[in-house]
Image (spheres, grey):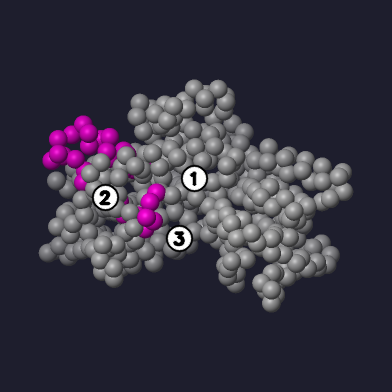
Amino acid sequence: MNAPQLGSDIDYDVLGVGFGPSNLALAIAIEEHNASLPPGRQLNALFLERQPRFGWHRGMLIDDATMQVSFLKDLVTLRNPTSDFSFLCFLRERGRLIDFLNQKTLFPLRLDFHEYFEWAADRMSHLVAYHHPVVSIDPVRDDSGDVTRFDVVCRDPKRPGRTLTLRARNISVAVGMEPHLPPGVELSERIWHNSELLPRVAELTAEGRPVRRAVVLGAGQSAAETVDYLHRSFPEAEVCAVFAKYGYTPADDSPFANRIFDPEAVDVYFGSPSEVKQSLVDYHRSTNYSVVDMELIEALYATAYREKVAGRERLRFLNVSRIRDVRRKPDGSLDIAVRFLPTGEEETLDADILVHATGYRPRDLAALLGEAAKLCLRDDGDALRVTRDHRVETTPDVTAGIYVQGATEHTHGLTSTLLSTTAVRAAEIHESLLERRTATV
């Protein structure tokens, strides 16, 4: 593939900020549509990514971890089942299609799906500029004072300390989530977020540093996976899981509950009153938030029981508990005070590492949008007002479009930050871009 075309003299139809699965799916939708059109009618798109290469939750690509969504909810299938960018086409090209089918599963390894994403991203390399972090987005007004374009300013890796300004009619913001930490927590070589799990464990292993005890805070899927991985990685260490629940909660992946992730459910959610939206989120939190696959729950319980029978319990569960304080000792290890909530009794754990598996939160889009944020309308809760086609509502003098992906749970429901409707959302944004361009011609 050719290198992407970057230039301050190019008038892009859409500039993507971030190049994770969401904007990758949009890039493929644009590419497939453009292939059927003459050059003058094609959408001119470019995507900017701060990372030096494609990456999706690399720190949690545990070798035996599987996806929690069907492979059919890949980048394209729900939009275009005949696309050669599907997961099945990837497997065929890699020579693993029959092997995968023989497993009789809808849920591939996370490593397998990440390789699929990389494969698709490589095919879109002519549309993405890696190592180009966006530093500001500025409105551009025409002679009548209307905002018809945005200037997207990014760092130029070829000229350290310098920036590059690109102009577009629309922007698609898909910058993903950022690790969520309890107030006051500062990460260090001993205190991690689970998003850093694999490289941190690799460092400890390479350096030969002993781990006597590891503590994991959290009760969701990532927390349970972290507990299991640390227990396997450090066979002499004690691993303590700390959470406020009495036990891990199984994820509800039953057929009727899973309908909350259907594309049609987005329409229902979007058109509902605010109190109904909140009820839907509350009713179906068990499909996604702070829940664990039943297979992993049973495996951890079985491990704990075997150790109890053998008389050497390395796997401990400190339930109905919270971490009250963490202090670093002179030798670098940690004193972690854990409070048992029913009685207030405290236990201090002498630990080598503490992992916060405390989830993710949406990034601050206002900080990223900069001056453009002042043009965005907000609801009574100070959240961005977003139309059904994923476009931010703006002041009347704005004709340029701001599309957001992954930060719309308040308007579009639980699928906002998940892969379930990625392909469908890409189709909706692509169709909106085409309609808006036609309307302005």
Q: Secondary structure at mark 2?
A: strand
Viewer can see residue 65:
yes
Give the mark nearest the N terminus, 2 or 1. Answer: 2
Q: Above or below — where is 86 with respect to 366? A: above
Residue 47 is one of the magenta-drawn residues: yes
Viewer can see residue 388:
no
Give the mark nearest the N terminus, 1 or 3. Answer: 3
Residue 41 is situated, as x and y percent measured from the top left of the image, at: 16, 39
Q: Gap in Å between the C-alphas at discs 3 and 2?
A: 22 Å
The residue located at (76%, 51%) in the rendering is: 315
The residue located at (82%, 46%) in the rendering is: 307
The residue located at (53%, 59%) in the rendering is: 179
Q: Secondary structure at mark 3?
A: loop
Q: Nearer the viewer, mark 2 or mark 1?
A: 2
In the rendering, which numbered label is found on residue 418? 1
Q: Secondary structure at mark 1?
A: loop
Residue 141 is situated, as x and y percent measured from the top left of the image, at: 18, 64
Left or right placement of residue 247 versus residue 384 in this view: right
Viewer-proximal residue among 210 and 382 = 210
Q: Gap in Å between the C-alphas at discs 1 and 3?
A: 15 Å
Left or right placement of residue 338 versus residue 360 in this view: right
**Residue type at numbered disc 1:** Leu
> Where is mark 3, residue-wise?
363
Range covered by the magenta-colored residues = 25-54
Q: Above or below — where is 21 with respect to 153? A: above
Q: Above or below — where is 350 with respect to 252? A: below
